[in-house]
Image (tube, coloured by chain):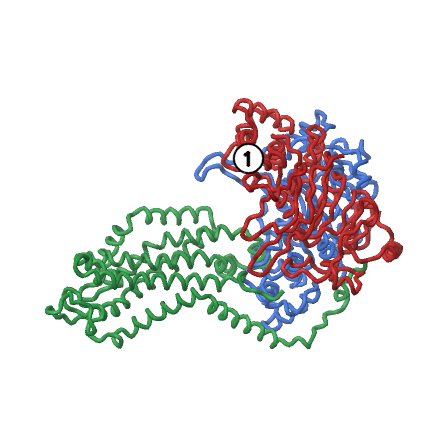
Chain colours: A green, B red, C blue
Amino acid sequence: MEDTTKSNNVNKKFILQEQVDINILKEQRREQVRLSFKRFFGNRLAVIGGAIVLLVIIIALFASVFSAYDPYEMSPMEARAELSRAHPMGTDEFGRDYMSRVFYGARISIQVGLISTSVATLFGILIGGIAGFYGKMVDIVLMRIMDAVLSFPTILLAIVLVAILGPSVFNAMLAIGIIYIPISARVVRSAVLANKEADYIEAARAVGKSNFRILFVELLPNCLSPIIVQATVTFADAIIIEAGLSFLGLSAQPPIASWGKMLNEAMEFMRTTPYLAIFPGAAISLTVLGFNLLGDGLRDVLDPRLRRGGL
Amino acid sequence: MEEVLKVKDLKTYFYVEEGVVKAVDGVSFTLKKGETLGIAGESGSGKTVTSLSILRLIPWPPGKIISGSVELDGTDLLKIPYRDMVNIRGNEISMIFQDPMTSLNPVFTVGDQIIETILIHQKVDKRAAKKRALELLYEVGIPNAEVRFSQYPHEYSGGMRQRAMIAMSLACNPKILIADEPTTALDVTIQAQILELMNKMKEEFNNSIIIITHDLGVIAEMVDNLIIMYAGKIVEYSDVRTIFYHPSHPYTWGLLESIPKLEKREKRLVPITGNPPSLVKIPEGCSFNPRCRYRKDICLREVPPLIEIAPGHSIACHLTGEERKKVRAEVGAHA
Amino acid sequence: MPENSKLVQVKNLKKYFQVSSRVFGGSKSTVYAVNDISFDIYEGETLGLVGESGCGKTTTGKLLLRLLDVTDGSIMFEGEDLAAISNKRLKELRRDAQIIFQDPYSSLNPRKTVSQIVGDPLRENRLATSTGATRRVLELLDIVGLSPEHINRFPHEFSGGQRQRIGIARAIAMNPRFIVCDEPVSALDVSIQAQIINLLEDLQKEFNLTYLFIAHNFSVVKHISKRIAVMYLGKIAELSDNETIYEHPIHPYTQFLLSAIPIPDPDRTRAKKRMILEGEIPSPIDLPSGCFFHPRCPHCQEICQVQVPELKDYGNGSEHYSACHFSDKFL
């Protein structure tokens, strides 16, 4: 049988096929990006998640527009009123319109989630990535530091950090972020360890890439999946912890309230006016759900392996 | 000789997102007592799925045995209640796999795993089972069986693990031993040991063996009869010498030609062009046609049935006897 | 053979790994992965390297590209000792020496397109502009037998054989002189192996490449290599041209190795007098004394237990090296 592999081409000189225009290839690239978008929007759950997140962010940004009342205006006569047209979410124990407070609370909670998660994830990637990639002493030292931080009870450590930094929402966010660095670092480190020995990493070395570039350009993008998942979990936890800090007076100072704080304060009135707990609780759950779904969708979109090719 | 296993028109399909994967698409063969049958093919040919189907080890979802029969000494295994398969597996039909590290449970000692097999199928007490297990370890050539009995799989080398697997599979004296790529993961000198061991065990236990592999050297070494599979179907089926010395299917020709021969000094290998088909998009007509140098019009349209062209020699191809003779004359018969 | 110049000269190469059972302190054991080997590779030829697990062939391949640091010994390449040069110079020399990996599934970054993977060497070493790199990638794809539309696809969209072609395209991107082929066809289907082997041979002819071809499948190695070195436990047991080593092996290990290979020819293979090598392949940690093969060797004598045999040339005129005290008996 005759061998018809492309061996004939080897005997030609380098003849570039001019008909293959570079532009056509650029178009191909753009098409792939378009396909990625299509895939994202085809994933119903991801779209729902994205919609929820978008909704919450818009509410947070334009809380003043959506709120009919000033969230700080007290009206003791109307304290803990029934749900009505005037107050669709009722009023709290000081007569403040609850719906406005929920809307304004979105600001705090989103910020808390985003900033804490960003701090935790960014530093987690740095520390976990370096520890996992370079190994040996670097790994041992870094991970033992992480273990030390992890060994403290979360709330306790948060309290200590905020006490040091000074009670404010921003410091609460920082503190929570710092506390979650070790968890993030661990996740990143195991993902790095899992992918480190792959041949394509060795190939990158053979081509002359520096360790730095290999770690950040070749390796880490392949570790995104668990990192994203962990980030969504951190987001949820951050909101809850901030609630605890708020309760202790270490985070948002009254009259500013986060959902977590509102939730905590509503515990007292569970028997009589449960909606005081239900609304902020539902807000937290919905937001967390939204970020989770969005995170899952992002993770799927970013994984080229899930893209359908044409071959 | 009596027939031990008779597989008729076996079809196993997998239902996945991309479509239906016809992993095994109408496979029939028989296995006689004391025979070693080889099933050769490349990845995606369906050889492993065939053996898993015999033992009904196909997970649903996504796989399902659609039709066909698998008769063990007259009983159709596909018709008996699923829970009765437990009595068949490890007992009447045993299977050993390619990677002994993952097929032995790492958290149990090797001895315990062998004993477990015995206790499940036979009514003996633990002491008798242990005695038998030690005997088996000794027979398969594991030195220091007493000590090795209480060791864990990771303390064994690759070759030894495979021996332990063979011991486990023979513990209940099965009628059939199915070996799926038993030596592919082993070094060549160890492979030689294991193949020799398998032959020795066959003599002792007088069982039948089905060997599944892509390694034609191992096939030539071990088997009496041979099935060549491609894309879920049998393309050639005969005794081993006929297939190696008088192959009659273009795929078999291609395979035999493309492997480097130790004895001959060749200038250039002759590969089969193209790639094995994606099992979701199997070509129309004869699934080999895109890669076949001798394809005719009919090959694009009709699936060739498996026909006996000589006693005990079947192929699935549209080429006529005349056309085959011509090809052999051109290319030079393979031998 | 000796007419061509020597492209690579390996002398007394050693690579030892330290493995400790505990993190701090604890007993340290040494893995003698590569244990004093010397050989030359001539320009334009293919030197085959065969052996079983633990023999050190893959480690040798990586050492030659300094993907691993050398414990001792020298690797002369283009007049410089790769074992001793600076990182900067190493990066420059890396353009001339590349590697093809075994596993087509893990040797390509799943998140990068073909264009990025194959063009990487060019961009990293600033050998081309962005458009220039794309043009070169198209050229390379054509050379290895892939179509231009493949350029923006991801690795998972290709079959094993095609991925290996991508890996080859990457390896030749910078026009190297020397390529280490680390089991390049072992993970491929039989019918595809021949395609890739032919491709490698064609590329060698066209671009005057020199290969170190590492594999455990002796038939493949014999086909593609001019000379073959058989490794065992970190050392070279025998080295000669491919026909001689197959027809007249003079080291007992080689004899066992060749005897164990099942030939795809039923009559021949069953008629062959099979020499079964007993015992396990020892680990490179607990090395036997004297000749590394003596515990399993049926010809073992007292001297074998004590003295390490040197790699001596037993060929008259042509090279035929063997590391055995009694090789002359097998001539």
Viewer-closest of B314 and A59: B314
Residue A182: % across, % down: 36, 52
Please report the residue visible at 62 percent of the width from the left and 51 percent of the height from the top.
B66
Amino acid type of the residue tagged 1 in the rendering? Pro
Residue A73: % across, % down: 15, 72
Can residue A228 be seen at all in this image of the molecule? yes
Query: Is A158 displayed left or right of C311 in the figure?
Result: left
Query: Is A257 displayed left or right of A113 in the figure?
Result: left
Viewer-closest of B43 and C274: B43
Asked if A301 appears above or below B125 in the picture, the reply is below
Query: Is C153 displayed left or right of A49 in the figure?
Result: right
Quadrant assignment, res B293: bottom right
Please report the residue visible at 80 percent of the width from the left and 49 percent of the height from the top.
B308
Quadrant assignment, res A231: bottom left
Can residue C323 be seen at all in this image of the molecule? no
Residue pointed to by mark 1: B153
Asked if A159 appears above or below A96 in the picture, the reply is above
Residue B126: % across, % down: 52, 24
Residue B125: % across, % down: 52, 23
Q: Secondary structure at mark 1?
A: helix
Where, quadrant-wise, is the N terminus of chain B in this rendering? top right
Query: Is B138 displayed left or right of A230 in the figure?
Result: right
